[in-house]
Each structure stands twice: as structure tokens, then as C-alpha cells.
Image (cartoon, helix red, strand yellow):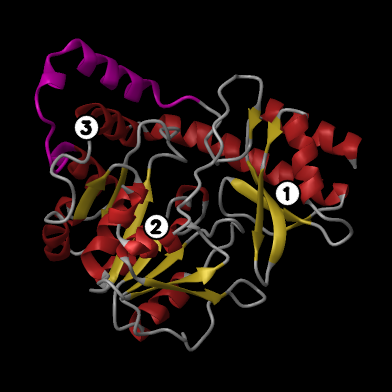
Amino acid sequence: MSQFLRPNIRAMAGYTPGEQPRDGEYIKLYTNEKPYPPSPRALDAMAELLRSDRLRKYPDPLGTAFRHSAGKLLNVDPDSILIGNGSDDILTILTRAFVPEGGLVVSPTPSYLLYATLADIQGARFEAVPFTNDWRLPTPWPKPDAHLTLVANPNSPTGTVVTNQALEGLAKELRGPLIVDEAYVDFAETHAVGLTRLSNVIVTRTLSKSYSLAGLRFGFAIAAPALVRELVKVKDSYNCDALSLAGAQAALEDQAYFQQTHAKIIATRARMSALLPKLGFDVLPSHANFIWATRTDRPVKPIFQELKNRKILVRYMNYAGHGDGLRISVGSEAEIDRLLDELQKLL
């Protein structure tokens, strides 16, 4: 049957999600999941829904209740919010909406590998623009005519951030939409929601990382209401189920619990940032829930493999022109103690 596939699908490699071990023996510092449980209010909301008869009915296709809660928290018009089955779904919707076959998708590099895959699926070209040596956007921007420009901010795998001033400058240079992918923004000190006042800026968010809901799959975008009305035409009719809508809304409303777990992540991140250099790693200042660790004295892939042998999963990544490194998620204090202890032994 593969002969009937579109040629670009046959040719593409596809995106490889993070490894999900089947047993509980591994310490997962690999896919940037938060090491603490979701909000108790979110769990209660989902449990209550399961006890009701609501699962036999279709969910609200627009997520109206969630949009009002998110709008209140972010101080935006609820009509400016588009819901998605994780922020990857939102990115897919945006690619389908804006990028024609043979079009151009552009992103800085190194960054999220899914962007190139989305371009491949669309039958579009993908071009990567290298960050400067100090992890800023080059000026002037060399690809202003792209059909879609994506900037992960904070960036993965580096954890670095681009200032709102630089993002605004980029948006004004572009002749197409700018997507600011804020999957990790809750671990940073600034965000770009205010830039959606510009007609070509869209901000995407997820509850997978900072709200401990990676297994639920829920994300959203913030854009001009008139644009959201157009994007609704592109999304699946019911792209978010009733369970995820209930859990996401309750999690977002439980800011007290969010702040408690957030403070733990920030404290552990600071400890990792201080101790990894003592083990010979070069560490960039991180504004996310992971650390990008590199070395100049030895290759890091054997370290990655040895940690895996010791049941600790971190992510090895290698980018052409930028070298390789280990992206290490901020785990619990006990998990990071184990990581540091094993690194001390093998180094």
C-alpha cells in the first residue's frame, strides 16, 4: 500500500517522540515531565466527570469554560484562545492553515525537531536559521518571506530565551505569521502574550510541562479573535475530549498548587546549574525545566549511554554546526541526587 502514499510522506523520516520505558525502574529525566502530581483539584474534576454521564456526550468543541478561565488568568479575551490536543496539535493546525504545499517553514536552530516534521507532512520546505553565538536571533532576519516562522521561547534544548523586544522586531520584519512556542514559558520570568496585539503573532502554550498533565494532552493558542475564528475551521471538530477540558480548566484555576510545585522546580534547577559545572559540564542559564549540558574535554554520548545502563534516562541531542549535549530534565530532589551521584562515579 505504500505506493499510494504521497511521495513526501514516503520520503520523510518522521518525528521520534521521547522514549517511554515500560517498567518503573528508570529515572526519567528525558522528556521534561514535571516530577510532581497534577493539581488535586484537576484530579477531582476528572473523577467527578467520570462519575457523571458526560462521557457519552460530545464535549464542547470550543472549550468555552476553559477559554474563560484561561482568559481571566492571562488577561486576554476568551475569544482569542484556541484549544488543542496538546500544543503539538495547535502547531499542526497552524501549519495546515498557513503553509501551502511547496511553501516555506523557518525556525532558528538548534530547536524543536517537530517543526521540520510538520513542514515535511505539509509537503513544504523547512529552513533553519542558526542562532548567534550568544543565542540571539540574527538581525536582519534572513528569511522574512516564510509562510510560517516558529520560535520556541524558552528554546529547547538550550533553555535560553529571546527578549520580547527581539520577538517584536522579528514580527515586524516578517511578511507572514510568527509563532512563539511557549511550551516552557511558565519556568521563565517573561512571556510574549502581550505581543499578540500584533496581527501576525500567535502564542502557543501547553499544560504538559508546568501543570503535570503530559498524559492528558492539552494545549492552546492565543491570537487575535478574528484569526481564531478562521483557525477553528481547520481543527478537528472535537479535538479535545471532555476529560481533558475538565482537568485542564481545574489545573489552571489552582494557582496555589501550581506555585508550590513551580517553586520546587526552580530551586532544583538552580542546584543543578550550580553542581553540574563542578562535574566538568558547561551549562547555559536555563529558563525552562531542563538543563543543556555540554563538554569540551570528552564526548557526551558515552555518558548518556552509561547513565541509561544505570537506569537514568537523559536526552542526547546532536545538531549540525552546534555540536552535541545532554538535555537533562529537572526532576525531583531525590532523582537529581541519584543523577549527580552516578555522574560523580562515572566521571
Amino acid identity at mark 3: Asp
Residue displayed at 21% across by 51% down: 82
Disc 1, SS: helix
Q: Would residue 49 be counted in the magenta stretch?
A: yes
Looking at the rendering, in which quadrant would you find the C terminus?
top right
User: Crowding near pointer 1: few (<14 within 10 Å), some, many (20+)?
Assistant: many
Judging by the rendered image, the residue that carries numbered circle 2 is: 10
Residue displayed at 55% across by 23% down: 22
Amino acid identity at mark 2: Arg
The CA distance from mark 1 to mark 3 is: 38 Å
Disc 2, SS: helix
Q: Earlier in the sequence, mark 2 or mark 1?
A: 2
Judging by the rendered image, the residue that carries numbered circle 3 is: 241
The region drawn magenta spans: 37-65
Of labels 1 and 3, the one closer to you: 3
Residue displayed at 23% across by 74% down: 199
Judging by the rendered image, the residue that carries numbered circle 1 is: 273
Of labels 3 and 2, the one closer to you: 2
The CA distance from mark 2 to mark 1 is: 42 Å
Viewer-proximal residue among 311 and 246: 311
As drawn, 278 above or below 30: below
Q: Is residue 263 visible in this depiction of the protein? A: yes
Q: Do the residues bearing badges 1 and 3 touch, measured as CB atoms within 8 Å?
A: no
**For residue 228, which numbered disc appears in the image?**
none
User: In the current view of this chain or complex, which residue is farthest to the top?
Assistant: 51
As drawn, 133 above or below 270: below
Q: Earlier in the sequence, mark 1 or mark 3?
A: 3
Identify the image quadrant of residue 143.
bottom left
User: Crowding near pointer 2: few (<14 within 10 Å), some, many (20+)?
Assistant: few
Q: Do the residues bearing badges 2 and 1 touch, measured as CB atoms within 8 Å?
A: no
Disc 3, SS: loop
